[in-house]
Image: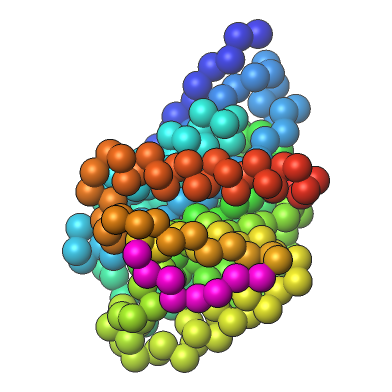
């Protein structure tokens, strides 16, 4: 069959409190029975909702389109209080941590939302967890998840807001610093940090830091987005030559 692009708006109850979360699910259908195909996936999160962040953010969409062109299943979601997601942004980030886990669980459970609501998706062989700005901070919380997933995970953290963690999490900075350290101390998880003119951390053999010269926090120009995508593309190429799952 010829490839068919599938784009669906779906709503998932957050595992935190059941709040309805909006997500945009996209992939290429390559087999008549979608469940017989196997895809890699990315989950993409957005900047701080009260300042206008949502899954239609320019960086979110640029990253989403890139991975979709590469044949990945993409899941770009809205945290509570953003887009069509219900509720409101929390002070601590804890509910948003679980909003993120909700998306990961959705993929791990083969598209199951509830006993009577299952979205048909391909089998997922690996997931790249992508966070931009506030979303990257929330992504670090997934390192502390007790759940064992049936696929490998890696991380791309774009413009991680280290200097304002105290503001975004109501002075719960220590918890997020611990999450970050857990991520960095992992011997098996691949991590890509991308900053604009701000090298806040150093790298080792499992995680890379890229500083983008002349790029601001918001990637306001097309050429800034192009540079970002080029960095991710090169990281994926290194990953594929190393024989990693993601």
Outermost residue, left side: 51
| Left or right: 218, with 175 as reference point | left
Residue placed most toward the observer, 48 or 177: 177
**Relative image position of residue 209 (x, y in whole percent):** 53, 64
Whether residue 179 is situated above or below residue 148 in the rendered picture: below
Q: Position of residue 131 (x, y in %)?
A: 45, 59
Horizontal and vertical percent position of residue 163 = 33, 81
> Is residue 42 on the magenta stretch?
no
Looking at the rendering, in which quadrant would you find the N terminus?
top right
Magenta range is: 197-204
Q: Which of the 4 quarters of the picture holds residue 52?
A: bottom left
Residue 95 showing in the rendered view: no
The residue shown at (28%, 51%) is: 219
Q: Nearer the viewer, residue 114 or 142?
A: 142
Q: In which quarter of the image is residue 173?
A: bottom left
Q: Main secondary structure of the magenta part?
A: loop
Q: In this view, does 113 lie to the left or right of 159?
A: right
Q: Kindly give the residue lying farthest to the top in the view shown.
A: 1
| Res. 221 visible in picture | yes
Residue visible at 60% across and 22% down in the picture: 29
Tally the numbered discs: 0
Measured as percent of width and height from the top left, residue 76 is found at: 43, 46
Residue at 63% in and 65% down = 207
Q: Give whichever of 184, 31 is nearer the camera.
A: 184
Residue drawn at the location 52% of the way across and 37% of the way down? 67
Q: Which residue lies furthest to the front in this view?
A: 213
């Amino acid at each position: 069959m010829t490839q068919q692009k599938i784009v669906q708006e779906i709503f998932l109850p957050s595992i935190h409190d059941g709040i309805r979360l909006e997500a945009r699910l996209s992939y290429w259908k390559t087999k008549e029975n979608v469940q017989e195909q196997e895809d890699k996936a990315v989950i993409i999160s957005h900047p701080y909702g009260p300042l206008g962040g949502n899954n239609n953010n320019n960086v979110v969409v640029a990253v989403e389109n890139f991975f979709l062109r590469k044949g990945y299943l993409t899941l770009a979601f809205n945290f509570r209080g953003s887009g069509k997601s219900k509720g409101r942004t929390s002070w601590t980030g804890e509910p948003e941590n679980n909003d993120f886990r909700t998306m990961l669980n959705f993929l791990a459970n083969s598209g199951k939302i509830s006993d009577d609501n299952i979205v048909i998706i391909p089998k997922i062989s690996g997931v790249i967890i992508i966070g931009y700005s506030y979303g990257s901070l929330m992504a670090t919380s997934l390192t502390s998840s007790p759940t064992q997933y049936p696929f490998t995970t890696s991380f791309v953290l774009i413009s991680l807001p280290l200097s304002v963690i105290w503001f975004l999490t109501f002075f719960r900075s220590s918890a997020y610093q611990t999450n970050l350290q857990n991520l960095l101390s992992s011997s098996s998880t691949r991590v890509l940090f991308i900053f604009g003119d701000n090298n806040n951390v150093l790298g080792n053999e499992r995680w890379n830091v890229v500083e983008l010269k002349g790029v601001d926090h918001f990637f306001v120009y097309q050429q800034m987005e192009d540079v970002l995508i080029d960095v991710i593309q090169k990281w994926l190429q290194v990953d594929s030559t190393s024989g990693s799952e993601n």
